[in-house]
């Protein structure tokens, strides 16, 4: 049936613009219930913030809060601009142009996605600090003896943090942008070429506006990840909201004050989401043409082709190859860790949690995105948007919300069993893998939901109407029409959640069972003590586990386009 959807749509389009299977149906009810479960930890944080506690807010507002706001805004804008520049440009080049090593760059551009931001920060600090090899070579070449003799950019700074995060976060924008470019209709691109537009003219006038929803979602994910980062800003000494939350919570022992800062951080995200929604207004971006053929590729010649190579090679070199080379050098002195039984167990724990989180997150994200598509009521959309904010809450603070939620549920179950059967169940969920998985789902729901939603927005509602007219229900329509058309978005969601779960550290440390370690927790424990050599084997293992899924994802996106051919 998927191959016939275009013809069916053309026949039934006039009567299929407003599709509805009714408000009371399992999809909308299920979407509301799932969103409610995801909101509960966030609501718990609000409850903690409103609880009576030591009066610390006025002190924070008069001292450190302005600095938190300034640094956080600059960090968000800097990383957002950098990831757009690298991610969108490289996605357009590898999707629509021909140049040397173009096929290799299709998957190589994703490699930095497997690199934790705090690890790359440690690596570049070791390279560029005063005692590092770069400055040592400069001093030997020019005869400098101290920092007073020359100026060198400070790696441990706000600019350094922007650079490090941009290098590892641009794949979010690249992934979604490339998936969007690969799903675009040949018809509109050919029309642009007939009207005399070249590669970049077609990009700015046609391709980029059509890909805008995916790009915006990618940048939103980047900014949420930027807001959540702790390891990089802590090591570089950049006072952001996240660092302030940790400081107030752990050093001042004031959970209420930390929750209040977390709510302020959420305001940043809410304003960001609302601004994007207002800017997009009621615009829609559908691919209505049934003309699916291999995308036209522009042959780049002369300096243009080498410029394209440089644009794609630089972020891969700086964000992956160089850090891996340094880590490999350090790891060579700790080769015994690769066969250590504990390290193998930690790797198994990471794979188990990441796989479980990825599968469940994509299933839930698809269910919710399709539930909104079937019945896009404002109330339902609002609930889902709030549920997606978990990605912007720092992992440790979100973990507190999960503990409060599951603790209340455990106590309720225990109380009921005591009253009814005289049996104490204790803590069934708290301190288990269930708690960690629940935290991951709340944390990464925005990744899966955003990726699926971005793909679904490009499927015209006429197809839903055609399927309904032919007697197909929502599940059959999703299975036979939508899923084949959004395979790239689904693959993107799986890999994003898997790789991010592999790197997640604060939330895992708090919610994990006793004596339960993952690769990320081991890396952070060593790296936070500046033992980069000891952390190198585990860091390389995280990267290795991310490489294969990243390559598979690139292949899935490449082959997800109907009418695809290698040519």
Image (cartoon, rainbow, N blue to C red):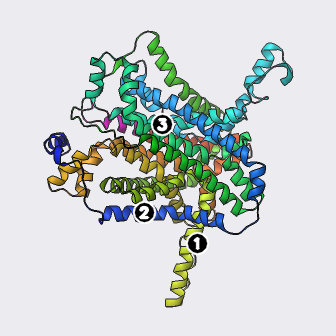
In this orientation, which residue lies closer to the viewer: 14 or 121?
Answer: 14
In the picture of the structure, the residue carrying the numbered disc 2 is: 34
**Label 3: how many Cα within 10 Å (few below 14, some 14–19, many 20+):** many
Callout 3: SS:
helix
In this orientation, which residue lies closer to the viewer: 85 or 140?
Answer: 85
> Do the CB atoms of the residues marked 1 and 2 lie less than 8 Å apart?
no
Single out the residue that lies furthest toward the top: 302
Looking at the image, residue 534 sits to the left or right of residue 35; the answer is right
**Label 2: how many Cα within 10 Å (few below 14, some 14–19, many 20+):** some
Q: Which residues are magenta?
A: 552-567
Q: Position of residue 291 (x, y in %)?
A: 21, 31
Residue at 46% across, 27% down: 90
Inspect this view and state whether residue 548 appears.
Answer: no
**Sooner in the amino-acid sequence: mark 1 or mark 2:** 2
In the picture of the structure, the residue carrying the numbered disc 1 is: 407
| Location of residue 302 with respect to 476 vertically, above or below | above
Q: In this rendering, which labeled residue sits more in front, label 1 or label 2?
A: 2
Residue at 72% across, 41% down: 238
| Quadrant of image for the C terminus | top left
Give the spatial CA distance, label 1 vs label 2. Answer: 19 Å
| Location of residue 557 with respect to 98 vertically, above or below | below
Callout 1: SS:
helix
Q: Position of residue 490 (x, y in %)?
A: 37, 46
**Sooner in the amino-acid sequence: mark 3 or mark 1:** 3
Give the spatial CA distance, label 2 vs label 3. Answer: 27 Å
Residue at 45% across, 40% down: 279
Residue 395, image quadrant:
bottom right
Give the spatial CA distance, label 3 vs label 1. Answer: 37 Å
Q: Give residue 173's mark.
A: 3
Queried whether the magenta region covers residue 395, the answer comes back as: no
> Do the CB atoms of the residues marked 3 and 1 lie less than 8 Å apart?
no
**Sooner in the amino-acid sequence: mark 2 or mark 3:** 2
């Amino acid at each position: 049936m998927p191959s016939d959807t275009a013809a069916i749509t053309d026949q039934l389009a006039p009567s299929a613009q407003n599709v509805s299977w009714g408000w009371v149906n399992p999809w909308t009810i299920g979407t509301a219930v799932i969103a409610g479960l995801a909101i509960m930890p966030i609501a718990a944080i609000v409850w903690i913030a409103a609880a009576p506690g030591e009066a610390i807010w006025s002190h924070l507002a008069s001292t450190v809060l302005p600095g938190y706001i300034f640094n956080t805004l600059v960090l968000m804008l800097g990383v957002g601009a950098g990831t757009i520049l690298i991610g969108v440009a490289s996605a357009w080049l590898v999707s629509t142009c021909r140049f040397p090593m173009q096929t290799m760059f299709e998957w190589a551009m994703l490699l930095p996605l497997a690199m934790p931001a705090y690890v790359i920060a440690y690596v570049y600090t070791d390279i560029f600090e005063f005692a590092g090899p770069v400055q040592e070579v400069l001093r030997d070449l020019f005869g400098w003896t101290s920092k007073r003799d020359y100026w060198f950019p400070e790696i441990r700074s706000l600019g350094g943090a922007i650079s490090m995060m941009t290098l590892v976060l641009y794949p979010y924008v690249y992934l979604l942008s490339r998936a969007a470019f690969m799903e675009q209709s040949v018809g509109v691109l050919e029309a642009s070429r007939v009207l005399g537009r070249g590669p970049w003219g077609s990009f700015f006038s046609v391709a980029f506006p059509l890909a805008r929803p995916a790009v915006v979602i990618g940048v939103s994910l980047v900014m949420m990840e930027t807001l959540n980062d702790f390891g990089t800003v802590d090591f570089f000494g950049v006072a952001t909201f996240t660092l302030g939350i940790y400081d107030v919570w752990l050093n001042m022992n004031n959970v209420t004050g930390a929750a209040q800062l977390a709510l302020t951080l959420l305001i940043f995200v809410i304003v960001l989401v609302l601004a994007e929604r207002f800017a997009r207004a009621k615009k829609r971006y559908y691919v209505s043409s049934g003309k699916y053929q291999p995308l036209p590729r522009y042959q780049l010649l002369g300096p243009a082709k080498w410029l394209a190579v440089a644009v794609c090679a630089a972020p891969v070199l700086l964000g992956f190859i160089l850090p891996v080379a340094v880590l490999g050098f350090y790891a060579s002195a700790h080769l015994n860790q690769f066969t250590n039984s504990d390290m193998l167990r930690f790797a198994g724990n990471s794979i188990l949690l990441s796989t479980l989180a990825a599968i469940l997150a994509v299933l839930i994200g698809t269910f919710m995105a399709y539930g909104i598509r079937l019945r896009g009521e404002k109330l339902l959309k609002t609930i889902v948007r709030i549920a997606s904010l978990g990605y912007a809450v720092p992992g440790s603070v979100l973990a507190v919300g999960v503990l409060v939620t599951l603790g209340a549920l455990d106590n309720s179950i225990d109380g009921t069993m005591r009253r009814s059967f005289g049996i104490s169940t204790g803590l069934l969920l708290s301190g288990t893998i269930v708690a960690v998985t629940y935290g991951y789902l709340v944390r990464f729901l925005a990744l899966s939901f955003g990726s699926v939603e971005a793909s679904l927005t490009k499927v015209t509602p006429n197809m839903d109407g055609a399927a309904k007219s032919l007697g197909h229900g929502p599940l059959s329509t999703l299975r036979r029409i939508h899923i084949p058309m959004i395979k790239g978005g689904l693959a993107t969601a799986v890999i994003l959640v898997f790789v991010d779960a592999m790197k997640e550290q604060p939330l895992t440390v708090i919610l994990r069972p006793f004596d339960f370690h993952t690769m990320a927790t081991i890396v952070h424990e060593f790296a936070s003590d500046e033992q980069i050599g000891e952390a190198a084997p585990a860091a390389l293992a995280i990267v290795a586990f991310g490489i294969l899924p990243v390559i598979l994802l690139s292949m899935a996106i490449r082959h997800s386009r109907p009418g695809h051919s290698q040519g």
